[in-house]
Image: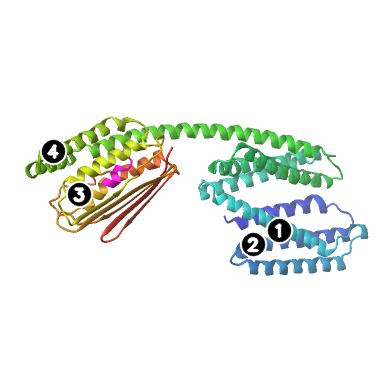
Amino acid sequence: MKTRWIEFFLITIVYLFFMITGIHDISDHVKQVALQLHLFTGYATVSTYLLYIYPEYFSIQRMKKWIVWTIGLFAVQSLAHYTVSEIYPLPHNQIIPPLALSGMTLLGLLIYSAGKAALTSLYSHTRFSEDRLSAKIIREVLLSLGIGFFLFLIICQTSPYFATLTAWSIPFCYLVYVTHQYYLLSYLRLYNNSNIIRITLSILCNLVYIALFSSLMEMTLSLANASFNGFNIAFCAILGFVITFLTYLSFAKQNQQESQILGLEKKLGKTAADLKLLQSQINPHFLFNIMNTLYSIALIENAEKTASGIHKLSEMMRFMLHENQQENILLTREINYISEYIALQKLRIADLPSIMIQVELPEEIHDNLKIAPMLLIPFIENAFKHGISLKNRSWIRIQLQVYEQELKLSIYNSIHTRSNNDPESHNSGIGLNNVINRLLLLYPGQHKLHFEETTSEYFIFLTIKLE
């Protein structure tokens, strides 16, 4: 069911409510008909606005048409009120000028439009699913209004005071709950606002609801020629405080449970990711490639270069087997490992002029900056795996920068088609999917990863907010 028809259904209930409870008992026939026609004019105006003008024209692109239609509707309503006043005149002390009646209706529609637009904008920034949440709220609003209306019809036969309080308390409590649970608290938590801002906005929202519903209570009771004499305001204030307090407790407990679940998922995901990472790094093909490289170097170079390669390999293995077990390591250790890996890869391509490798690593880094281990190397391994060809012109450009607590890694590499005999042609091996999952688990909302690929080049850009 579209929103416009739900709004029409609700305004129809309000119209019938005032027709049944406020007008049908008037003994003066002329006055009764006049009030009925005035009420029907207002009902027709609001219905036309909600069903046609607002959904069709209330947008930035069509704002001019919305203004024209709204002014036209105001003019038609004023003319209708004036005609009714001329045919069925009311006593002088009960006359409200037609323009004033139309103006009150227009003001109410403008306030409603502004509030609806604000809530829609606020709702679009929340993390909830629109379909599920909107359907849930619509069902519950209709249910609360229906319960309140029928309770009023039943209880008003005995005590109009109790009936009015009961009828309006149900939607009041639900709106206070919905505003805090689904919008206010969730939205402020999303942007990490302070408790002072939460409490201030919560008080302002409650004041609006208290003013609105206490007025509705007083207006409803005035139909029975009675008054609450301020009790309705105190009643709404106490009720609003209780509902708000309970909502805060419920929201805090919900956050605690979500944090516990997220922590367990994070630990489980990190353990699985670390295991897959070790499997992808310490695999026979990787070791055989390095050993073959060192063997080739031993045949054509002196033992000093071979010893250097073996040393670098041993340092890398030590890093993978020991420091990779920690949750976080110093960023300087991660960069040292990257340097060792690049230096080891350069050993096998040092005499090939067709291969160009450019590396820019930071020289000075804040000593306290930490990062999850083995988080950057898969991207660099991927560049060497797909960017190096011993037959064709190849290039790799690696740039790692650190500004305060933000790390930026950019990698460009050439792309070469692998032969079917290459054992790596059908093997992902490097574990990019794994490292992407680790980023989502370890740095949610604190990283940006961008890939681009052309027919000849592959590009990766990564930024991470470090601790």
Kind of residue at badge 1: Leu
Residue beneath the point at 12% across and 42% down = 292
From the top left corner, tell me how far across and down residue 100 is, in percent: 82, 61
Left or right: where 331 falls relative to 94: left
Quadrant of the rendering where the C terminus is positioned: top left
Q: Residues within 10 Å of mark 4 (few under 14, many from 20)?
A: few
Q: Nearer the viewer, mark 1 or mark 3?
A: 3
Give the residue number, with chain letter if any, for mark 3: 426
Kind of residue at badge 2: Tyr
Give the residue number, with chain letter if any, for mark 1: 109
Residue beneath the point at 66% across and 60% down = 50
Give the residue number, with chain letter if any, for mark 2: 54
Question: Mark 4 or mark 2, which is nearer the start of the sequence?
Answer: 2
Residue beneath the point at 59% across and 46% down = 137
Callout 1: SS: helix
Q: Which span is picked out in magenta? A: 374-380
Kind of residue at badge 4: Glu
Give the residue number, with chain letter if any, for mark 4: 304
Question: Mark 1 or mark 2, which is nearer the start of the sequence?
Answer: 2
From the top left corner, tell me how far across and down residue 196 is, in percent: 64, 38
Question: Mark 3 or mark 1, which is nearer the start of the sequence?
Answer: 1
| Circles 3 and 2 in contact, beta carbons < 8 Å | no
